[in-house]
């Protein structure tokens, strides 16, 4: 056998046996975004988000509900709240938000 054939057989045997080690980064070796950050959470019903988006002092809102809801979410975003999840079904949905805890 030639040396290239011996090498090929050795490589194939090593791969089959799982003895060739390749330096592949593992998920647990990578830095996790947000690691060490302390979070603050907020859970709001959909009605509270709609009220937040209504024009100041408005009793009856003429805008489409989704526009008012969007304004409420944008106000929360301006306060650094990030929407993580919407649970439930409209009209009884709940909004789950998070933001880094103050003072970090």
Image (cartoon, rainbow, N blue to C red):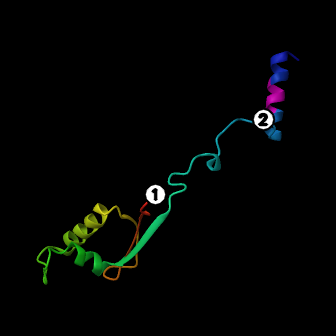
Residue reaching furthest right?
A: 1
Q: Is residue 95 above or below residue 29?
A: below
Q: Is residue 43 above or below residue 18?
A: below
- Is residue 11 part of the magenta span, yes or no? yes
- Image-quadrant location for residue 15: top right
> What kind of secondary structure does the magenta stretch mostly adopt?
helix
* Relative image position of residue 32 (x, y in whole percent): 55, 51
Residue reaching furthest front?
A: 103
Q: Is residue 76 above or below residue 62?
A: above
Q: Residue at x 11, y 77 (%)?
A: 62
Q: Nearer the viewer, residue 13 or 70?
A: 70
Compared across the picture, whether 61 is left or right of 89 comes to left
Q: Which mark is residue 20?
A: 2
* Relative image position of residue 77 (x, y in whole percent): 31, 62
The residue under label 1 is 104
Q: Nearer the viewer, residue 62 or 76?
A: 76
Element marked by disc 1: loop
| Numbered disc total | 2
* Relative image position of residue 83 (x, y in whole percent): 37, 65
Q: Residue at x 80, y 29 (%)?
A: 11
* Relative image position of residue 95 (x, y in whole percent): 37, 73
Q: Residue at x 47, y 64 (%)?
A: 39
What's the magenta region? Answer: 8-12
Compared across the picture, whether 3 is left or right of 38 comes to right
Q: Earlier in the sequence, mark 1 or mark 2?
A: 2
Count residues near mark 1 (Cα–Cα under 10 Å), then give few for <14, some for 14-19, many for 20+. Answer: few
Q: Residue at x 28, y 75 (%)?
A: 49
- Is residue 10 part of the magenta span, yes or no? yes
Please say if the residues under marks 1 and 2 sit with CB atoms less than 8 Å apart: no
Q: CA distance from mark 1 to mark 2?
A: 44 Å
- Image-quadrant location for residue 67: bottom left
């Amino acid at each position: 056998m030639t040396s290239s054939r011996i090498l090929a057989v050795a490589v194939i045997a090593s791969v089959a046996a799982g003895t060739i080690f390749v330096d592949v980064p593992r998920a647990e070796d990578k830095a996790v975004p947000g690691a060490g950050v302390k979070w603050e959470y907020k859970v709001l019903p959909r009605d509270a988000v709609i009220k937040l988006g209504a024009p100041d002092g408005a009793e009856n809102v003429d805008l489409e509900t989704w526009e008012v809801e969007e304004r409420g979410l944008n106000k929360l975003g301006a306060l650094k709240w990030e929407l993580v999840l919407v649970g439930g079904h409209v009209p009884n949905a709940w909004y789950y938000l998070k933001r880094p805890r103050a003072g970090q």
